[in-house]
């Protein structure tokens, strides 16, 4: 039975229904049916997802069907407010006995919230209507909030809904839906009770008074940074590296002696950590593989397979093979001996992945093997069979690698046939280590959404919530922006281990409702298009592909001139502004300069859109074609799909 795994809102007004099945099994369409009055909407399914404008649903309850049967859903809590005939309509996803139903109904008059903030032991709200009162839910008790100031001391235990001028207080016109998930107000202790404002699922404002809630859970194990304490650095790491060297030597003999396998001289193999996951390397690898697959046989070998369906759609014409499935059994509980201990994915690998990779190396007897990270590059240099053309990809600059891995790279990279880097500076660093170093930037992935509106008062940032991305620095810079330009908002897209710390920083600085952690998105193009400035605050980068993605949406860029990448993409004073690394005040000043100069913002936006064309997949793909030709790879025998 097919189910909808998730229902989500995209770019403020579209609904995404994600099916829990592989893209190859997609039905042609979902059918939304309304009984009274009768109506029908057909939505095509592409790459496991149905995406449609919620405004297309007229008033009423719409049952979602698939192949003539009601579509089941695992959960459904998405709510979107869309304009309809001069007013507003709310479309809400709900479950009716596990069946997915979309309710579309007039929102009705409400008091639009301009701003809400906590000051001491009071909630201060700014709304157009007055007076403001809080009504206890489930009762008839009312507490006045003169001048929009609601004193916590006047509230008893329970949930209090805010009203103004007799209307429910809500925030629906700012383009952000699902505020319950992205806006967290600070809690205040009132005796034995906690008081915390919150947005409801309908984006209305309420206050909960009750016993203290549980603290947020710690970051998951898979998000935690690997420990680099003295014991590991001085004892465990050298021992693990010694085991790695011995195991690699044994694996080389196993691979090179008597193996039989594929020997197509034109086939391209790509070794990737997790083809089903989320990340820039995955997205850009898919772009290149899709281009090469137009004229060659291309297979991506994924070390892991830990998701039911891929976060990004697999490229057309490319075979994706999982080297390991599920939990991997007993061998998966034992640490890897092949992946270098100083590679950041070491903790994700195991003896099970080692065995699977050795089998892959034994099977590939010809063609091209492209590896996508330093630890895999090192393995390919040592284990690839004679006759296999090996191309390593480097996404980070040399000094960002840990010492043990850097030493192994110096020792083994010379056995690679070629190494690609993302910028010219990195090419210069790696050139002494390899026979051939070539700078090939990441290709721009296909993105949805149109071109950004330069008048939108939104700064957009995106990336994993890690220390590298420097979102803590961005929030510090935005404190000044928020003080001097209070109408502007910051939206940060991405997930990761620093989320709790960043949320605490937002609360401590009073930026809730202004700086939003929007979470990961499958629709980055649409979300980028909601802003008018893109900001990159990284402490270091391998390239900064998200800069190119933002420029392709017509966003001027403000970025730290960190090592490395931004300075090769952004033309300072033409399509963006570069600021000295980690200069928080300089970052704030650069953002404010574009905020206060709409004409320059528009000019930079147009220049950014034009500059992004140099990273089109057709342009970058030709550089890969030229590299393969230069390495003597014969013309493809593959005729294509």
Image (cartoon, rainbow, N blue to C red):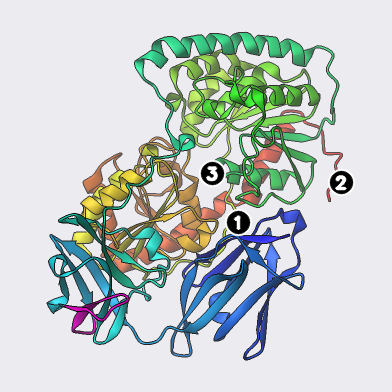
Q: Against 293, is 193 above or below?
A: below
Identify the residue shown where x is 31% and y is 44%: 501
Give x and y (percent) for residue 180: 38, 63
Q: Is residue 219 left or right of residue 259?
A: left
Give x and y (percent) for residue 138: 32, 76
Q: Secondary structure at mark 1?
A: loop
Identify the residue shown where x is 40% and y is 10%: 234
Identify the residue shown where x is 26% and y is 48%: 505
Q: For mark 2, does the 10 Å Cα neighbourhood hold few (<14), some (14 to 19), or many (20 or more) residues? A: few
Q: Quadrant of residue 299?
A: top right
Gap between marks 1 and 3, in whole Å? 15 Å
Gap between marks 2 and 1, in whole Å? 25 Å
Q: Which residue is mark 1?
A: 446
Q: Is residue 318 left or right of residue 12?
A: right
Identify the residue shown where x is 73% and y is 43%: 292
Q: Against 101, is 444 above or below?
A: above
Residue 566 visible to an observer of this rendering: yes
Q: Quadrant of residue 140?
A: bottom left
Q: Is residue 2 left or right of residue 276?
A: right
Q: For mark 3, does the 10 Å Cα neighbourhood hold few (<14), some (14 to 19), or many (20 or more) residues? A: some
Q: Secondary structure at mark 2?
A: loop
Q: Against 421, is 202 above or below?
A: below
Quadrant where the image shows the N terminus: bottom right
Q: Which residue is mark 2?
A: 639
Q: Which residues are magenta?
A: 128-143
Gap between marks 2 and 3, in whole Å? 31 Å
Q: Which residue is mark 3?
A: 279
Q: Verify whether residue 139 appears in magenta.
A: yes
Q: Earlier in the sequence, mark 1 or mark 3?
A: 3
Give x and y (percent) for residue 48: 68, 59
Give x and y (percent) for residue 638: 85, 42
**Nearer to the camera, 639 or 114:** 114
């Amino acid at each position: 039975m097919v189910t909808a795994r998730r229902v989500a809102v995209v770019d403020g007004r579209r609904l995404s229904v994600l099916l829990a099945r592989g893209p190859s099994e997609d039905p042609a369409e979902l059918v939304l049916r309304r009984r009274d009055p009768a109506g029908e909407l057909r939505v095509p399914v592409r790459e496991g997802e149905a995406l449609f404008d919620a405004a297309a649903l007229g008033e009423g309850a719409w049952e979602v069907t698939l192949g003539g049967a009601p579509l089941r859903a695992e959960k459904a809590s998405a709510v979107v407010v869309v304009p309809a005939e001069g007013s507003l309509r709310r479309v809400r996803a709900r479950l009716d006995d596990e069946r997915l139903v979309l309710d579309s109904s007039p929102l009705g008059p409400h008091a639009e919230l301009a701003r809400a903030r906590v000051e001491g032991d009071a909630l201060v709200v700014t709304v157009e209507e007055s007076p403001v009162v809080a009504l206890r839910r489930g009762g008839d008790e009312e507490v006045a909030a003169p001048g929009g100031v609601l004193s916590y001391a006047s509230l008893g235990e329970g949930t209090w809904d805010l009203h103004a001028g007799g209307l429910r207080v809500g925030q629906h016109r700012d383009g952000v839906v699902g505020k319950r998930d992205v806006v967290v107000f600070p809690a205040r202790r009132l005796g034995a009770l906690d008081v915390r404002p919150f947005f409801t699922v309908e984006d209305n404002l309420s206050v909960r008074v009750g016993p203290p809630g549980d603290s947020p859970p710690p970051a998951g194990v898979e998000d935690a940074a690997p420990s680099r304490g003295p014991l590991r650095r001085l004892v465990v790491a050298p021992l693990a590296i010694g085991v790695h060297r011995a195991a690699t030597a044994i694996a080389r003999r196993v691979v090179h002696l008597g193996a039989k396998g594929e020997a197509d001289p034109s086939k391209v193999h790509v070794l990737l950590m997790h083809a089903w996951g989320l990340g820039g390397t995955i997205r850009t690898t898919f772009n290149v593989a899709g281009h090469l697959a137009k004229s060659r046989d291309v297979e991506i070998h994924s070390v892991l397979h830990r998701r039911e369906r891929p976060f990004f759609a697999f490229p057309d014409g490319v075979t994706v093979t999982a080297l390991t499935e599920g939990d991997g059994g007993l061998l998966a509980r034992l640490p890897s001996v092949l992946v270098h201990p100083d590679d950041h994915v070491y903790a994700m690998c195991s003896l099970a992945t080692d065995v699977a990779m050795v089998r892959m190396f034994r099977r590939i007897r010809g063609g091209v093997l492209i590896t996508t990270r330093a630890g895999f590059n090192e393995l390919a240099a040592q284990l690839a069979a004679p006759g296999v053309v090996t191309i390593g990809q480097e996404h980070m600059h040399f000094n960002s690698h840990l010492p043990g891995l850097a030493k192994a790279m110096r020792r083994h990279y010379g056995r690679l046939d070629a190494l690609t880097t993302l910028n010219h500076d990195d090419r210069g660093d790696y050139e002494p280590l390899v026979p051939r170093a070539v700078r090939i930037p990441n290709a721009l992935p296909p993105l949805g959404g149109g071109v950004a509106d330069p008048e939108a008062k939104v700064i957009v940032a995106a990336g994993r919530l890690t220390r590298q991305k420097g979102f803590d620095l961005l929030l510090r810079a935005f404190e000044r922006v928020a003080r001097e330009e209070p109408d502007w908002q910051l939206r940060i897209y991405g997930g990761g281990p620093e989320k709790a710390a960043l949320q605490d920083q937002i609360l401590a600085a009073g930026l809730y409702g202004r700086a939003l952690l929007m979470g990961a998105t499958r629709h980055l193009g649409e979300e980028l298009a909601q802003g008018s400035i893109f900001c990159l605050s990284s402490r270091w980068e391998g390239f900064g592909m998200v800069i190119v993605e933002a420029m392709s949406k017509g966003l001027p860029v403000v970025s730290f001139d960190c090592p490395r990448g931004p300075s090769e993409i952004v033309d300072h004073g033409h399509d963006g502004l570069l600021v000295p690394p980690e200069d928080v005040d300089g970052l704030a000043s650069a953002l404010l300069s574009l905020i206060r100069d709409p004409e320059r913002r528009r000019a930079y936006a147009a220049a950014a859109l034009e500059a992004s064309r140099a990273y089109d997949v057709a342009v970058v793909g030709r550089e890969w074609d030229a590299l393969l030709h230069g390495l003597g790879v014969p013309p493809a025998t593959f005729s294509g799909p």
